Amino acid sequence: MKALLGWLGRTGVLYLALCLAFAFYILVWPRLASEFSSESLRQDTMSVADIRDTIAQERSQLEADLRRREAGIRELGKEQLDTRIAAAREQRADLQRELDEGGGLLDTVRPSRLLAAQRTRLQIAALDAELAALTSAREAKLSQIAVEAADRQFDRYRRIPTENAITVSYRLCREAEGRLAEFERLNEVEQQARDIFLRERQQLEDRRDTRCEAARTRAARREAGIAARERLAEAQRAYAAAQDWTTAPLGDTTEGMADTTLRDVLVAAAWALLGILLTPYLIRAFLYYVVAPFAERRRAIRIAVPGAEIGAGSSNRVAAAEQSRASVAITLAPGEELLVRQGFLQSSPAGAELRTKGMLDWKSPLTSFASGMTFLTRVRGPETTTVISADEDPFAEVTAIDLPAGAAMVLQPRALAAVVQPQDRPLRIESSWRIFNLNAWLTQQLRFLVFHGPARLVVKGGRGVRVEPVDSGRRFGQDQLAGFSADLSYSVARNETFVPYLLGREPLLRDRVEGGSGVLVLEEAPHAGRRKGVRAGLEGMMDAGLKAFGI
């Protein structure tokens, strides 16, 4: 049943995956394919300057095409012009609507979309120029029609009476009116006689009417002819002005276009990435060739012990110890006692006296507490042998260092596992600060604890402790140091190999001890057995802080 359900579940998931794949291919892929065609991908590599150059070339081509079509536009009739104007306006509205609708989020930085938008604007500008030309041609055509109408109207007044003819006509009209007035001033008998026999009144009135009407007609004709001539001249001037048009050059549609494209963003990001990748190496090279040599030349830390004469043949010189091992046996001489850190007392004689001591050094309670040298087990008893070994740390090894009377050693209390000291002369521990020494900051140790003999120090370390003579000087990793003989010079030195440091495999500086015949105490693997993760980071921070105080 379980196998059947598992098969059904796997089959159902496979069926769902196939459905999603087919849906993507049918519904989404065609649009993606059109958006990311080979041509659009090629355009997406263009810079802003490339887009401007492409638009400038296309603008020149459109301007040349408009100039070639200008003669054809001038020859179109009014109805044809109206049809072309309506079609151009509709096409422009469609392009403007497409431009206003916008597009995706990356259209403002994607070169292919920027180029498409600029081409749309260029087409709109070309249509505007064509509409202006068509409108001008239409105005010219209307002006031509107006000239033809004015010319036809002026044809009716080709012969315009002169002013002298009109003056003569009005003079004849006045003469006829004068003769009629003279006739009317005669007495009535004479008027009736002339009118009966000669019909003179009727003749005088007809002559007056004819001549005055002719004068008025000539004056009206002259006035109408002059007005028609002026209208023709005005129509001709308007036609001449309307004919004086040409296709306007297209404006630069790339003004206001964004100066940053997706290519610029990608190039800037690539340079930023390259800078991010190279900056650590440049900083490391600067530190290696400039800062590290400067630090090497600074004054070394030297902790002098008053009254001590450490030399090659001196009896109070600290000698090299035996090879460290998992456990070491400590035999107490008469008058000695053993102080053992918690977790390091493996076995003790049945007849030994065991007690608890609160701190290693009551004068330095914080140091004793921070280093773990509290609640120590005190073992007393002559000729008793006690075995010291780490109960919990499988990587820890121990060894014993003899510290004769008059000798002194700088030691970090964290490395102490046990101390053998005279019962009547407890181990003396002194503190020495080096706050104003650059090497102290570089070695991350501002305070040094000096242990004075006579005593035997049982030191511990991860995977072993090495006690070796300094001779002409020793270099070592910073975390390895557990202690060194007093009156030696302690400083930093630049790492010998540059490439491993550049690649982050070696530190910039290594600690250095020189200037005497003492010994150096090093921990073989200081990080062996330590925790990983966040807790290890917190413990590492605390260890670094304790190291600064010599603990």
Image (cartoon, grey):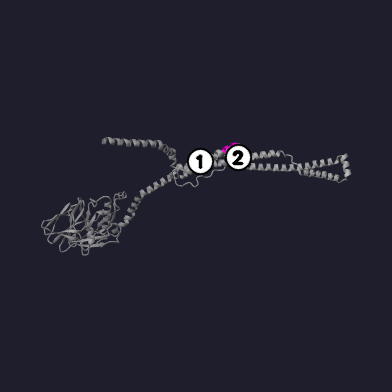
Dot 1: element: helix
Magenta stretch in the rendered image: 78-84
The residue nearer to you, when weighing 135 against 360, is: 135
- The disc labelled 1 sits on which kind of residue? Leu
What residue is shown with label 1? 95
Q: Position of residue 146 (x, y in %)?
A: 65, 40
Dot 2: element: helix
- Mark 2 or mark 1: whose residue is earlier in sequence: 1
Side of 357 relative to 493 (left or right) = left
Instruction: State which quarter of the image contains the N terminus.
Output: top left
Q: Is residue 41 above or below residue 425?
A: above
Q: Position of residue 170 (x, y in %)?
A: 79, 44
Q: Position of residue 247 (x, y in %)?
A: 57, 41
Tell me if mark 2 has few (under 14), some (14-19) or many (20+) residues whose alpha carbon lies within 10 angstroms of its own.
Answer: many
Residue 319 is one of the magenta-drawn residues:
no
Asked if the residue at tag 1 contacts the one at tag 2, i.e. Cβ–Cβ closer than 8 Å, the answer is no
Tell me if mark 1 has few (under 14), some (14-19) or many (20+) residues whose alpha carbon lies within 10 angstroms of its own.
Answer: some
**Residue located at (42% from left, 46% from top):** 265
Q: Main secondary structure of the magenta part?
A: helix
Q: Quadrant of residue 172?
A: top right
- The disc labelled 2 sits on which kind of residue? Arg
Side of 126 relative to 373 (left or right) = right
Instruction: State which quarter of the image contains the C terminus.
Output: bottom left
